[in-house]
Image (cartoon, helix red, strand yellow):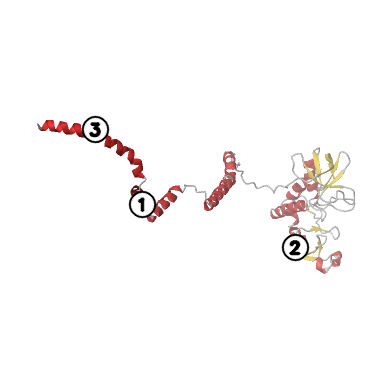
Amino acid sequence: MIVSALRRFGRLYSAPRFFGLLCLLALLPLLSLSPVACAWAQTQQQAAAPTPADAALDTAGTAASTIPNNADGPRDATAAVTNAAEVEVSPVEPAAAAEPDSTAPAAADAAPAPQTAPTTQAASPGPEAPPLPQPLGLVATCFDGDTLKLTDRRVVRLAGIDAPELAKGDRKGQLFAREARGQLTTLTQGQQVKLLQAGVKHRDLYGRILAEVLLPDGRSLNEIMVRNGAAYFYPHRDLNPQLQERLRNLQHEAIAERRGMWGFLLSQPVAKNTYLGNKESLRFFPSDCAEAQKIRPRNRVYFGNLMDAFMAGYAPARICPFWPVTP
């Protein structure tokens, strides 16, 4: 009975319920435009809108999130210029630093300089002087210890030196004159020699060629004769200063070791006499020579003995000879 009542009730209300639902669906758009609906929507929007504090936080977060690693602002532009400058400079600096390194392998690979033993020979003459016109010639004969004659008849005077004089006419020969000529003859007879410029003048008052004479092996005859004590240093202001210095040093050695004529000359009584030198001419005289008294006082140089005069680089004057002579 109850079941049948319900079935009847359902049949009575089922059609109206379906109709009501259709009406409700049709009225929904109209309900959304109602003041109530608008108020309800504004409430929902206000609830969803962020507060000012939240907006500030969001703005800061957004700004932080948009900062790149390499910024594009003015400060970063300066940094970019600095980096560019470093890029331009950096290749230059390593190149300058690497310059010594490029030469280092060459220095390391180069063979070490050979070690040379010290020598006791005389100092090297240094750069060779310019040769004279027609520098080569064969030696025909030697007149004394400082003058020789070539086969082409040229007469050559060894510049910067003087040897004892040989006997001539009534004049007796000086001590060690024959020995000096003998040494020069032995060194040069039949040899081809080379003539080098020895100073400003190439000829003396007698027309003889003034030269430094080299042997075929390159040795200087001028030096050999002084070193051996066969001639003495004869200074002159027109001569090459380097040549004069070499000859003077060699004379010091020869005197100290009493080579050649020095062993004889410095043992003679004349070696103990006093002498007077002339600063202008670089010649010295016996103190009792009349010509020596004509030297101006400011140019006078006094020597206590003969060796002092030679060691000072002075040479005997032609006048007032004091050189011992052979019997």
- Classify 231 as above or below 275: above
On the image, numbered disc 2 is attached to which residue?
305
Mark 1 element type:
helix
Q: Nearer the viewer, residue 245 or 20?
A: 20
Q: Residue at x 73, y 49 (%)?
A: 227
Q: Amino acid at mark 2?
A: Asn
**Amino acid at circle 1:** Gln
Q: Residue furthest left?
A: 1
Q: Residue furthest bottom?
A: 297
Q: Tag 3 or tag 1, which sits nearer the N-term?
A: 3
Q: Residue 139: horizontal and vertical position, in percent?
A: 83, 40
Instruction: Work out how far the residue at label 2 is from the one at label 1, CA to CA, in angstroms.
Output: 133 Å
Residue type at tag 3: Ala
- Single out the mark in the foreground, 2 or 1: 1
Q: Residue at x 17, y 34 (%)?
A: 9
The CA distance from mark 1 to mark 3 is 43 Å
Q: Residues within 10 Å of mark 3 (few under 14, many from 20)?
A: few
Q: Relative to 304, does residue 139 appear above or below in the rendering?
A: above
Disc 3 designates what residue? 15
Can residue 261 be spotted in the picture? no
- N-terminal of the two: label 2 or label 3? 3
Q: In terms of depth relative to the viewer, which is nearer, 61 or 236?
A: 61
- Which label was assigned to residue 46? 1
Quarter of the image for residue 237 reads: bottom right
Residue 253 % position (x, y): 70, 53
